[in-house]
Image (cartoon, rainbow, N blue to C red):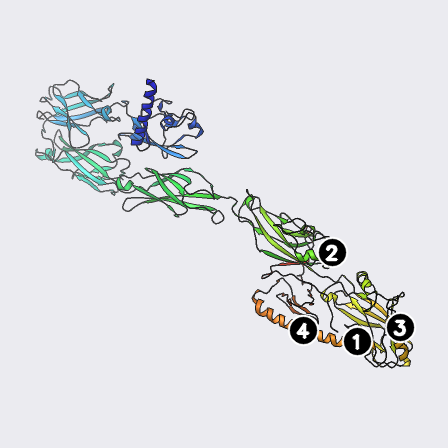
Amino acid sequence: MGERWCAVMRVLVLQAAWALAGGQVRYSVPEEAKAGTVVGRLAQDLGLEAGEAEARRLRLVAPGRRASVEVSGASGALLVSSRLDREELCGKSAPCALRLEVLLERPLRVFHVELEVTDINDNAPIFPAARKNLSIAESSVLGSRFPLEGASDADIGANAQLSYTLSPSEHFTIEEENSNSRSKSLFLVLSKSLDRETIPVHRLVLTATDGGRPSLTGTMELVISVLDANDNAPQFNQSVYNVYLSEDAIEDTIVARMTATDLDEGTNRDVKYEIDTIVPPRASDLFSIDANTGEIRLTGALDFEEVNLYDLNVKATDKGTPPLSGHCKVVLEVVDVNDNAPEVWVTSLSVPVPEDASVGTVVALLSVSDRDSGENGRVRCWVWPASPFGLEATFAGSYSLVLREALDRERVSEYEVEVRAEDGGAPALRASRGLRVPVSDVNDNAPAFAQAVYTVLARENNAAGAELARLWARDPDEAGNGRVSYSVWEGGVGGGGAAASSSSSSSSSSSGGGGWRSASSYVSVDAESGRLWALQPLDYEELQVLQFEVRAVDAGEPPLCGNATVQLFVLDENDNAPALLPPAGSAAEAGAAAAEAAAGAGWGSESGTLWAWAAWGAPAGQVVAKIRAVDADSGYNAWLRYELWEPRGKGPFRVGLYSGEVSTARALDEADGPRQRLLIVVRDHGEPARSATATLSVSLLEAAEAALAAGSSSSSSSSSVSRSAVGVELGPGAASAATNVWLVVAICAVSSLFLLAVVLYGASRWAPRAAVLSGPGPTTLVCASEVGSWSYSQRHSRSLCVADGAAKSDLMVFSPNFPPPPPGPAPKDSQPEPSALLDTVSGPAFIPFSAPFHPPP
């Protein structure tokens, strides 16, 4: 129970220490620790469970330097990976702290670890030279001090605190002096007068001992030559010169000016100057001194980031015999300037970024530093451009690049982000690091057709498999999200619903009485290319317009779709010949009309001949008979004209060109014979024209016989041979013909006025929204009415005019002028050129209609 309580207390103490330290873990390890030494249980200190460190890839990031430590993937402990030398890592800096970054994934987190490398006494004191030669005049007074260059110890703290001892001597002692400089001054002190004749040379050993445990020592041999005569050495006006010099000082800059005086006279008073020693020794080429004036000048470039303090020991020597010397120290402190730009490193980058990534998503981790100090080393960072990314400071010198705004790959698929850093120096220095952040696609765009409604014109009797049109839907997504497949969206039999089907006009015009047929029985769309194919030949007499929807679906997850409405208009071809009808009022008219129209043959008696009677002496213009015919086509293809084929020349009869009425061309007389045989041809206006023939036999009788024949034919309407008689006098036939002429004239006049009124009204109301079917090649403006048809060619546009409200008007749509095929041979895999024109109809839906066509008389 006590051990568990102690464990709980340790956890609480660790959490409190973590909170006080601002979320930073601190460890210490002595230098020269063996590889594999456990520095600390990092995973446990970060609060990770067993095995979580390996699962979340706990790892160490040390930008810009070798860390010498690593994280164990299995245990999560921080281990020594290579030799740790505090002097190599930090030099004389104390404490020696390494700042490390630890990354933890899923989710991504960064922790900061401070590793302090403690010093051990692994460096012995070292003198600048193993042997030092000194010359001391025998006239030197007791207590004279001679400066010595002390030893240096690469360690710090107590391990670098040196003490000096001198081998036993009755003439000399060693003395240390603490000045206001950062280093101690070491002097050899004369304790007993010298006698050159007794001892001309003194050989002593100077030992330096550091404060480590165990302590280490270094030695230097002192060879002291006793000189005679000149007994006054030059003296400087001050023992220590403190100098401050900017690191950007140029060469030949004066560092300091020394002045030393000698109380002797003559040549023993002349002094020359020289730099005795420099600390650190590698800086010996940075300074020079004028031997006569004592001016110290700069001969190289200073760098605060490498060395910020120099100790120069200057010696002034007179020209006496023996020469005497005086010494002073110049302590040069280098002043930092802003000569180092900030440095930016990318420690982690998570790309590409999904375009549906949430705001706040971490994209990259960055580390920023500046080698300068003070304000020159204080750095601020920002991102350019400012959107859609931003920077968040996570720790001193560490930043996270996060998402600030929603992304849209279709608008911007890749971002060039620049992280900029600026220090606080004057002038400020800047640095930048470019990042390329691609955006990955998600399926957020549905396919969209270029047009909401497609209008397709197709000729009837087209070949099965002919291409009618090409539909195209655009999906701005990429790869599978933008790959579109097409299909005809069908509904159930009997209609409606959400599914597209053939229009009411197409269903109502279907033959056979079996109800409407779905669009898929007429057309099919290629799933990949969007080509619209005809599954079977189209028949204008069966189907005039077909309306359905085409759906475009992408391959994303989940799939998105778009729809477009297709209106297919079938154009009439002249594929039906005129069919003769029985005379009006005959008993066989009702049954024979449909059979004769379908078969395309004439009607008549058993021998195929029509019979009529005319009285001798009938005046010119007397109607004898009327040929009736019908054409199953529409428009020009159904507009019929009648021609008298035989007899040619000036015969007694003529035929109305459009009425089919057979009338006398002149007055009949006995010279015309008892009977006239007429061969009449009925033609339509199609290309090529189709025709039918009728044979009419006209018997010439006396007036009384003609009246009797007319009465007999009226009473025997059920006879197998149909005949029409016309009397010479004003009989029933002549009266009926005259009445028909005036009735046709009246109907044409009324229809023309009504059609003109409708056209003017429609032009004033719907002119801005007129339906325009644009296509290449010359086009034709077509209008129709009961009294005939007319056309007007125009080269660059095609307009379709419909007379609304005309109860019996017949819409005639001429075949569109398709452009000629391009020059050169057609490709082998090309399909037959579709006999269709695809375009958009703006305004209300256009549904063509058809009514029986009556040519003008």
The residue tagged 2 is: 511
Residue 556 is situated, as x and y percent measured from the top left of the image, at 55, 43
Residue topped by disc 1: 737
Which residue in the protein does label 3 denote? 712
Image coordinates for residue 814, horizontal then vertical, percent: 69, 64
Pair 1/2: label in front: 1
Q: Which amino acid does label 2 sit on?
A: Ser
Q: Can you tell which quarter of the image residue 272 is in?
A: top left
Viewer can see residue 88: no
Amino acid at dot 3: Ser
Q: Position of residue 769 (x, y in %)?
A: 57, 64
SS for tag 4? helix
Q: Which of 676 and 687 is in front in this view?
A: 676
Q: Name the residue under label 4.
A: 752
Q: Which comes sooner in the sequence, label 3 or label 2?
A: 2
Looking at the image, residue 273 lies above or below residue 626: above
Which mark, by number, is residue 603? none
Q: Earlier in the sequence, mark 1 or mark 4?
A: 1
- Pick whichever, 628 or 70, lies toward us: 628
Choose the circle earlier in sequence order: 3 or 1: 3
- Horizontally, residue 27 falls left or right of residue 689, namely left
The residue most toward the front is 715
**Can residue 669 be seen at all in this image of the molecule?**
yes
